[in-house]
Image (spheres, rainbow, N blue to C red):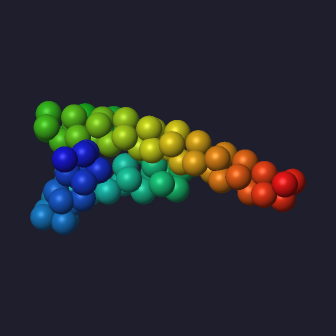
Amino acid sequence: MNAIKKARKFIEASPASDSAKILTRLVRALESDEKFELSDLYKLDYEKFNLGIDMLKEWRLDRYYMSKAKLLDLSVHLGELQG
């Protein structure tokens, strides 16, 4: 199971916990470019800290693929207009 899915399940199961609140803030920061204090990750236990780090990795990878997909879409669209 990927980290983003694990985080969603954890947050749904324990939305009031401090760890869920920190991970929720991390998600909001990643999605909307809000500020997030990295030191908040150190407030998490080891397992949730690693989950946060894995979320960062997946989010970065997803953004790369999203940018690549947008470029491909634009290229296809322009190819149709030119051809």
Q: Residue at x 52, y 56 (%)?
A: 32
Residue 4 in picture, x, y percent from top left: 29, 50
Residue 61 in picture, x, y percent from top left: 44, 38
Residue 49 in picture, x, y percent from top left: 22, 37
Q: Residue at x 24, y 45 (%)?
A: 2
Spot the residue most to the front: 83
Q: Residue at x 64, y 47 (%)?
A: 72
Image quadrant in which the C terminus is located: bottom right
| Quarter occupied by residue 54 | top left
Spot the residue most to the right: 82
Asked whether 36 or 5 is in front, the reply is 5
Residue 48 visible in the picture: yes
Residue 17 in picture, x, y percent from top left: 16, 58
Tally the marks.
0
Residue 37 visible in the picture: no
Asked whether 36 or 60 is in front, the reply is 60
Indicate whether 17 appears above or below 62: below
Q: Residue at x 37, y 49 (%)?
A: 26
| Quarter occupied by residue 67 | top right
